[in-house]
Each structure stands twice: as structure tokens, then as C-alpha cells.
Image: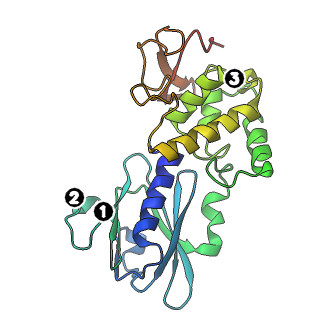
Amino acid sequence: MPEGDAVRRTADRLDRALAGQVLVGSDLRVPQLATTDLTGATVERTATHGKHLLTRLTMPDGTPLTLHSHLKMEGSWRVIAPGAPWPGPAHDARVVLRGARAEAVGFRLGIVELLATADEGAVVDHLGPDLLGSWTADDEATACARLTAVPDRVLGASLLDQTVVAGLGTIWMSEVCFVQGVHPQAPVAAVADPLRLLRRARLLLRSGLQHGQPLTTGDRRDPVWVYRRQRRPCLRCRTPIEAGPVGAADRERTTYWCPRCQPAP
């Protein structure tokens, strides 16, 4: 599943193509919106909260609406020139937004819904603070409180829980645990400074947004410390990197660590 920085890059790409444009056509290929026509709507911008995309529109009668989408595991938004061939099969398209200068097609989107912009809270208010958002002192306090609320919970699972903090996936979770020197399968209580960990996570996501890819080491030849580097030597101590499930209750997702730099709990 794309992580917060990748989702923000998607939103920026949609903005470059459609922000300020009046839609000359639309096609919403989900049952609940099959008869909805957004032609004539002005695209204001696409905001994000964690991994959620919020494309804000003003309808011809002045009504503000938000197209809420989520990429889930397989989704993507592609921008093409008007009339150009689609970079994917038509049966995978869920949303088509046509502007005079560009066309945006959402393929295999996991969530597509239309709601009043004033009601966006219904789909994002349950989430934790967005690591790529404004990140105020209140956001820090809220995220830290949610992270430490269950001290014996597995750290990796807590960081991946979007209701704790929004935007982290397995790449950044694995990388920030390495940078913090804590094992991802350790309990949250093992983190000596949770606020520092969250601040580092924010820095990593901002770096990924800036560079267009994870680049936690600063070296494009070896851009990450541990993610998907199992059996390869740690770039810091040369110990082979190990991999395993995030935790006993989350065996579907994989995390990575250096057994020397991040001692087992």
C-alpha cells in the first residue's frame, strides 16, 4: 500500500493537472455514483490526510463537494493528455475526471465516495495526526498520547495503526525503528523517547516526499537501512538484516531489523 509521502505526491500530481480547472466530463464507475455527473464542477485542490485523498470540488450551483478516494493496495491515479490512451485497462478504471488540459483516471481505487466538503470529518476524524500535515504542538501531543496509550502493544503495529498517527506504512515504520535503535517487535514501552521517534518519522516522510522515493541513508545506491534488505549486511555494523511479521497479531505484514543495532525485546 502506498505510504503517506507517495499519496501526497499523487495529490500534487492531480493538482498540477486539474486544480483551478472546470471539468468538461466525468465518469464515476462505482455503483453508488453511477448516475453522478461532475461536469461543470471546478476542481479546487486535492488534500490528503495520511493515505486518504480528498479532491475538493465546487459544483456549478456553488455546492462544495469532496471526492474521497483511497488507493488501498492496488490503486493509482494517472494523469494523461485529453484523448490519450489510458495507461491501464478500462475495466480497472473507477473514476475519470476530464479537464480541458488533462484527464485524471483512478484505477482500482479501494474507496470512492462523494460527500459534502463540510462532512470530510466523517472519513478522516478517526485518524491520528497526519505526519505530513501542519503538525502542530497539539498534533505531537495527540500522536504521542495515542502511541503510548497501550505500553505493551507491539511498536510496529502501533506505528502502522492509522488511528494513532497517519501516513506510516511498512517502509517508514521499519526505517524509523532502525534510526531510533529499537526493535519493531518490541513493546511501545521499550521506546525511551516516543516524541523523538515521531519527529524522526515525520522527517523521513518529508524526505521521501522531497526526493520522490525512500532515501533514509542519503545514498541512492543503498537508499534504505533495513527495508527488504533481509540477509544483506547492515550498512552500519555489517550484521545480516532479519525479517519477520510485525507481531503475533499481525502476521500478514513484514518488518525488517538489524539484530545488533536493534536488540530483540
Q: What's the amino acid at mark 2?
A: Pro
Amino acid bearing label 3: Pro
Q: Quadrant of residue 21?
A: bottom left
Residue 12 vertical position relative to residue 195 in the rendered view, above or below = below
The residue shown at (48%, 60%) is 11
Q: Give the residue furthest to the bottom.
A: 61
**Crowd rating for badge 2 (residues with CA inside 10 Å; few <14, some 14–19, many 20+):** few
Task: Say which residue label 1 marks.
Answer: 93
Residue underneath mark 2: 89
Q: Which residue is mark 3?
A: 187
Query: 172 or 107: nearer the eye?
Result: 172
Task: Between residue 161 and residue 227, name the one nearer to us.
Answer: 227
The residue tagged with tag 3: helix, strand or loop? loop
**Can I make out residue 150 in this image?**
no
**Which of 26 and 224 lies nearest the eye of the viewer?**
224
**Residue 158 percent coordinates (x, y):** 65, 34
Residue contact at pointers 3 and 2, CB within 8 angstroms:
no
Q: CA distance from mark 3 to mark 2?
A: 44 Å
